Amino acid sequence: MSYNIIIFLVYLCGGLARGTALNNLNVVLMNMYSHVAAKFAVTSQIIALLSISVLCGSIMGTFSATPIILRFGRKNSILYMALISLLSSVTSMIPVHYVYLGVNKIITGFSTSIIMTAIPMLFSEFVAPNLRGVFGSFMNLFICVGVLISSIIQFYIAPHDKLFYISFVPGTVSSVLLIVLLFWVKESNTQKHATPLNENKNKILEEQNNSLQNEEDVDQTKQLKINTEKQNIEQIESIFSRKYRKCLLVALTLGPALAGSGMNAVIQYASQTFASSFNSPYSGTIGFIIVASVNTIAAIVATPFIRLIRRRLLWFISLLGCMICQSGLLILSFDFMDQKLNNKLKLILTIVFILFYQMGISSLYLAILSEVFPLEVKTKMMNFGMVMFWLTLITTTLLFPLIPRWCSYLLFLSIQTICFIILFKYLPETTGKTLQEIRKIMVDEEPKVEIKPATNAEALLE
């Protein structure tokens, strides 16, 4: 079997595990679970809390990914997280209580977010340069496929509450297949070389600690720690200096521009939004399948646009399209026209919104985030960007079922408008530019003061 096929299958299983996890807490499943587990009323508050459980686990996974990968290696991190994901999927099949289900989904969100991070890192040096872009888009695509598969399964089991556990089967199967595939996967060369170096470093540190026999050495060590802490504080302060003002503004608005679109809420609550759009008792589920299908197709169609259109132009076309659709949904949320026509227009605008979202801002976010910042502040700026992304995503998903629909769409539109204005001014075009050229645009260097050498006459006067 070709190693590229193994890589493809690992991406497939990792993406499906993540996609099914995201979809396993929509309103349809919550209603089914409430009838089988310790009976509870599916209130807006419970819907909101359960809906963000996967996201809370995801943000924890995002912050934990780097230390876990450094500690266990890329391959082993995927293996351990796949085992955890498998365990949480199996235990979610047992009907206990909505709090129990929420805790399981936090664990699933945590493990699958680390799998998402570690898989591209592991295979980056094994994939041929001409295939990197293709493989890079697979994770987003297979997550969309996972959401679609899960929604189709829920459509068929919706009339039978006791079959709710079947919705967790795709995630369970994906985790099992991922574990099996990892037996044929090689650890990256980078990780192989990193382990002995870390071991040697630890040995050297132990020897140095053992050699501290007098007070002078202890004092020097303390002073070294103080100096290191000062350097770290100065480095953080420098990020907030005028020099990196553009970088900071881009970092703080790039994530909210994506998460503030409300895409997660649109998919998560599609069954609720389209509950009366079709002449069927399962109207909400049908609407959800349509939205999930369009999301998957849009992820496939988006690939050629990324290659043909410059990144900055595509980003703003996509963002502006999302804002126009949100404006239309805001107007329709007041229900001032015939209900059937209103529902059809909502569905059409939602489909167009998803197309614009996948065409640009969803596909370009990580690419722009990884290349727009100068190397000396890249890590910290990317961390700021990811923190803002997750905070915005959790806020919009949490509020969507708790506030009137028009307030939700107004919130999405307001966030995107603010981000559009700031990014239009400060986000540069990165297509075809070197990192040095991008740095010159993003960093406000202080002008250097030229010191002219003194003339002979001036020297004599002094």
Image: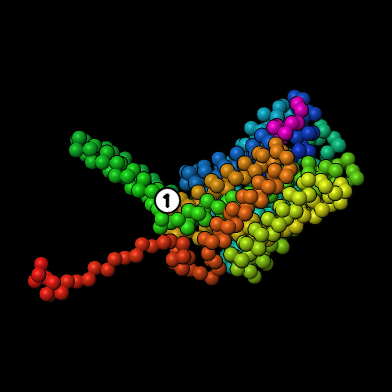
Question: To which residue does mark 1 refer?
Answer: 240
22 with respect to 186 (left or right): right
| 46 inside magenta stretch | yes
> Going 19% across and 35% down the picture, which residue do you hit?
214
> Going 47% across and 46% down the picture, which residue do you hit?
70
Q: Residue furthest right?
A: 279
Residue 54 position, x and y percent, is 64, 40
Q: Residue furthest left?
A: 460
For the residue pair 420 and 205, the one nearer the viewer reads as: 420
| Amino acid type of the residue tagged 1 in the rendering | Phe
| 444 inside magenta stretch | no
For the residue pair 15 and 122, the one nearer the viewer reads as: 15
237 with respect to 438 (left or right): left
Q: Secondary structure at mark 1?
A: loop
Q: Is residue 124 visible?
A: no
> Going 48% across and 44% down the picture, which residue do you hit?
67
Quadrant where the image shows the C terminus: bottom left
- Quarter of the image holding residue 458? bottom left
Residue 431 position, x and y percent, is 55, 68
> Going 78% across and 33% down the picture, which residue do you hit?
31
Q: Residue furthest top?
A: 38
- Quarter of the image holding residue 176? top right
Q: Is residue 338 visible?
A: yes
In magenta, the rendered stretch is 40-47
For the residue pair 273 and 12, the one nearer the viewer reads as: 273
304 with respect to 230 (left or right): right
